[in-house]
Amino acid sequence: MDSDYIFLVFFTVLSQSAAGIFILREVMLYSSYNYMIDKHLRIITLLIAGLIVLIAIITASFHLGKPLQAVHTLRNLKSSWLSREILFILIFSGIILLYLFTEFFTESSSIKISLSISGIIAALGLIVCMSGIYMLKTIPVWNTFLTPSSFFLTSALTGISVMFIIIPAGFGKGSIIYPVFSLLMILSLIVSAFLYFTGETSSVVLFITRLVTGLMALLVPLLIYSGIIPNKMPSRLFLLLLLLFTEIIGRCIFYTGFYKSGL
Amino acid sequence: MGSDGIFYTNRRSFMKWSAILGSSFLGRNSVFKEIFIPYNPEKPQDNESKIIRTGCPAHNCGGRCLLKVHVKDGIITRIETDDRPGDDISDPQLRACIRGRSYRKRQYHPDRLKYPLKRTGKRGEGKFERITWDEAYEIMYNEISRVIKQYGNSAIFIPYGTGSYTNLNGRWPAVRLMNLLGGSLGYYNSYSWACTNIATPYVYGTLNTGNQRQDWLNSKYIIMWGWNPAEMKDGTNSEYFIRRARENGARTVCIDPRLSMSAIALADEWIPIRPGTDAAMMSAMAYVIITEKLTDDDFIRRCCSGYDSTQMPAGCENEESYKDYILGTRDGIPKTPEWAEKITAVPAATIARIAREYATIKPAVLYQGYGMQRRAYGEQTVRAGAALSAITGNIGIPGGWASGLGSQAGGEPFWSVFPSGENPVKARIPVYLWTEAIIRGKEMGPADGVRGVAKLDNNIKLIWCIASNILINQHSNINRTAAILRDENLVEFIAVQDNFLTPSAMFADLVLPACTQFETWGVEDGWKYGEEVFLTPKIVEPLYESKSDYRICADLAKRFGVWNEFTAGGRDEKAWAEWIIDEIYRKTRFPEMPAFRELEKSNAGVYVKPVSKPVVAFADFRKDPVKYPLKTPTGKIELFSKPLHEMNNPEIPAVPKYIQEWESPFGKEAEKYPLQAIGHHYMPRVHSTHFNNEWTSEAFPQVVFMNKADADKRKIKNGDIVKVFNDRGALVARCRVTSKIMPGVIDIPQGAWYMPDKEGIDRGGNINVLTTERWTALAKGNPQHTIMVEVEKFKG
Amino acid sequence: MPEYAFYINSSACSGCKTCQVACKDKNDLPTGVNWRRVYEIEGGGWKEENGVFVSQPYGYFLSLSCQNCENPECVKACPTTAMHVNASGIVAVDSELCIGCRYCSWACPYGAPQYDQAKKVMTKCNLCEDYLSIGTKPSCVMSCPMRALDFGTWEEITSKYGTGENVFPLPDPSQYKPGIVIKPHRNSAMTRNDKAYIAENEYK
Ligand code: SF4
Ligand code: SF4
Ligand code: SF4
């Protein structure tokens, strides 16, 4: 992997996490789980999502040769997925910001619902555009459903595991969310395996690490679910760190597979 | 993907080497970074900068091309090439290759030598201090005077070197100076053409066996035998002429262990052959031609000598004739294609087919490259090739080719015409034997090829090496040479005059910074073929304190009190250039050439004599061999040579023979060192010049080319760092695993700079740490391609 | 129709890379930035039967710069419009706009956009626009010792040389409509039944 891609690894994983957190938050708010998210948590989740987006944007700028000229990046919405991605990330961050304001200054549910819906659209749009960037004719490994799948899975997995942390009571020990998480993790590992085997260059070390940490990240929720380990902060924090680590390794595998057809 | 980048580009290795030197005076962060004016696309430069046409500083590359040098504010900003309209085949554009086009990276290289340097550490250690020119001249004056007084002039040697080739830059002025001071030990022959220089005249009595190249367009069949003109440049445009010959209907075959650039671009068919076995295939071709009666009997009868028992020279009537050898009448071994197949690895059927094609598709060219004569029995290959041309009668006809060295008939090149004067020291050694003359000069006589005297009266005690990397880099068996040079009791003083601190300069006691050819006046001619004369004007000022080779010698002449004689009454470089053009070229070979002043004013850079009716070598001789005899003892083409016969040496047979080389895959040595190594002339360099040019070495990094089968056996992957070694030394380089070289053979492009590490392993990839100092029997020439080696993955 | 076309006579190209360096010299390109690149394609192998080799490897060269595609993927991909088609119909980089994201170099199927590490912007062949404007052919074309390159408008080149052939490893041209006309080397036919590869890529 080109060492420069490390910025892209963090950018993509982080921005996808933010999208995941946001979407999960909204889904919970407008479902039977809304009791879990009080006023306090509503602000915290937004703050966290916003902060992650901010860090992601800053990380991405390290990848650029001339970050100071980045204002020009919106000039080619017509055809550039990169331009569109940046538009969506800006909209997404804007919505988070607005949303935060509304959490403080208004109780109007119609405003919140519209922000919620447009935020979800922005978050999904962001991931779609991001996939568009990588789905190039010239890079056959990426030009498959694996790219969006991997991105959406990252979103979902990080979203859930962050929620594990911020909701103090957590999901109950028998909650369905644990097996769902493990299932998603299995899918995520399968996608990684595909990327590993179809990529031009591949690193066994990366792949083994990914497998081991991924399997651990898959096991922990199941153990919590079955009550073998306690649903306590340390184990939840451990899960989050494990997940972030394994996803980052997974993304490294993604970039390592890079090769251009043609020249 | 190799993780270790250290050896990857030459540039980086070079920096590493400099780090080893730890020498601060190299001044890597030179002012050039600041004064260098980059191209600004908004401002078309063409309107502002001066364009000067000149000859490429070709360093003996084999071609001579025209450069259009853009100069702005005293700096060369761009180098373009010949764009004269027309590009007609009689006078095609002299388009420069990658070396000429990348010259700015050499001209403005931060490592250019800037000041005279004096050695401070042990010899060869590479420790120097900056001194003034005055001090430098003083040292030169004292050392030369001392050695003349103590030993005599024959203890002084100005080695062979081709790093500068403009009459006024290069070794010739120094030879002139030494000749005024009583002379110096002379040499004859060259590293490039040692065997062919000597062997060709035994067949033809001349070196001018080639037709003018336009004549290739008349050919129907061209064998490029070990010839790679697209890469090594055997004359500017040679590769283009072959392209045109093919378009004219010629079929081309390339016989070479490597799928060379020429094999790809110029050949219809490529036949890989085991290095060093060319004479076997040639003999087998002769067998087919003779036994199938495809010989040109009339030509053989009229023009050849020694073909069969009917035409043996007087006194040798009972000796083995050429035909006897081929048919095996005496030795019992008919040289059949089946016999040759086992030696050459070329299928017998292919040998027979090529023989038939060559003998029947007429007129045909058999062009011999020079790599195959830089071998143990190079003389045999040269003569075996010439014999094939002779028995098929492809000599003296348009579209044919006599083989042998192939300098062009109707105008031999002049190389250098600078009047270096007569050498009062009559002794001349074979050029390759200079290290012998250091250690046992006084024992050397005619048996060692010494000419002019019965015995040398001195060992070499002082070396003044100019525009030459022969001291270390280009001579065989570097580890041996280095040990000899390190011993200050042998050579007592070494001065090196060059543009860079080359591996040879590392062994100097005194380093003199010479300027490049862009920084002084000079005159070049068209190397081996060309009908061209280039005026190379001074385009920019010499950088720092560097001076032209001529100027350095003139300054020294002043100290020795011979300035007036040396400068012929005060001529500077420009005045000499004028003299050379007006008094030599115009008065001999090119009377129609414009005078110097005109040439200078026109800024044409070159005078070309178009060739519309190419001269065919030996045409007169073929018509009437009695009236126009050759300068051989019999006046004919000598397939059997009486003078060689009289040498009575099994290594110098009277008829060309295949002899198994002293290091070969068939010998016992192959058990330990199973791979043959050759070192071809590489596109990014001219010998060792341009090794530090970042643009050429980016395009063509120094690598060891190895066949996949050999690599697999050794668990070597493409891009791995490998160690190549034999009993004489070891080198480390990146390995390029490729199918473009035949199994059993590796290629280490020659000319990489020798950069020993602490263990004495060369990190630059110089093949000469593996080559042998042994010389060939007849020519006393360099057999640098005849070596056996082993390769392993480098751990370290 | 693309605006312009390079004619690349692969059958005559010796792979000497003079064109590559002529371009570097004209445009002052540092090591690592090659607006024109000569690719060395290699394939085949050796088969030994009774001590002699019966099958052989093959190779050829392709000299490529920017094909000035009619459908330039680079222009589509560039987020800033720095990569654009200029008034003369040449695909060019506006370095004032370029942010150095290198995305165009992913999108271009020919490796034409070349990132300049020092300048931190994308650069690429500009077809020697300054030369074209004074009626001179591009530097690379004028440099070739084998006379294997030519340049002109699409009409000029195709009427002189036809439309040529597409050879390995170039992608299907129909989607990009590149301005190149290639006269293939006879060896490129071998790539149809054999896995050829770009030699440089194997050890860089
Ligand atoms: S200069 Fe000509 S022959 Fe040399 S690589 Fe370029 S296109 Fe090929
Ligand atoms: S070759 Fe590449 S850079 Fe050139 S126009 Fe086509 S897509 Fe763009
Ligand atoms: S057209 Fe000009 S800029 Fe483009 S590759 Fe050729 S020399 Fe370079």
Image (cartoon, rainbow, N blue to C red):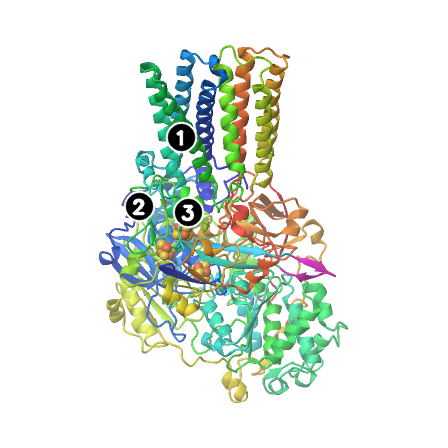
Secondary element type, mark 3 = loop
Mark 1 vs mark 3, CA separation in Å: 63 Å
Residue located beneath label 2 in the image:
C94
Where disc 1 sits, the SS reads helix
The answer to whether A49 appears left or right of B200 in the picture is left
Q: Is residue B264 above or below residue A183?
A: below
For the residues labelled 3 and 2, the Cα–Cα distance comes to 42 Å
Q: Residue furthest front?
A: A110
How far across and how far down the image is residue C183, in percent? 48, 64
Residue B179: image location, x then y, percent: 39, 63
On the same chain, marks 3 and 2? The answer is no
Q: Within 10 angstroms of label 3, few (less than 14), some, or many (20 or more) residues?
A: many
Q: Which percent across, then down, holds residue B392? A: 61, 80
Q: CA distance from mark 2 to mark 1?
A: 30 Å
Q: Is residue B593 visible?
A: yes
Q: Measured from the top left, where is residue B564 in percent x and y?
A: 28, 62
- The residue that label 1 is drawn on is A122
Residue type at tag 1 = Ala
Q: Chain of mark 2?
A: C
- Left or right of A187 on screen, residue A99: left
Q: Chain of mark 1?
A: A
Check disc 3 and report the residue beneath it. B501
Cβ(mark 2) to ligand 2 < 8 Å? Answer: no
> In the image, is residue A68 above or below residue B171?
above
Region in magenta: C46-56
Q: What is the chain letter for disc 3?
A: B
Q: How many marks?
A: 3
Q: Nearer the viewer, residue A26 or B451?
A: A26
Question: Can residue B163 be seen in the rendering of this structure?
Answer: no
Left or right: where does residue C99 sit relative to residue B214? left
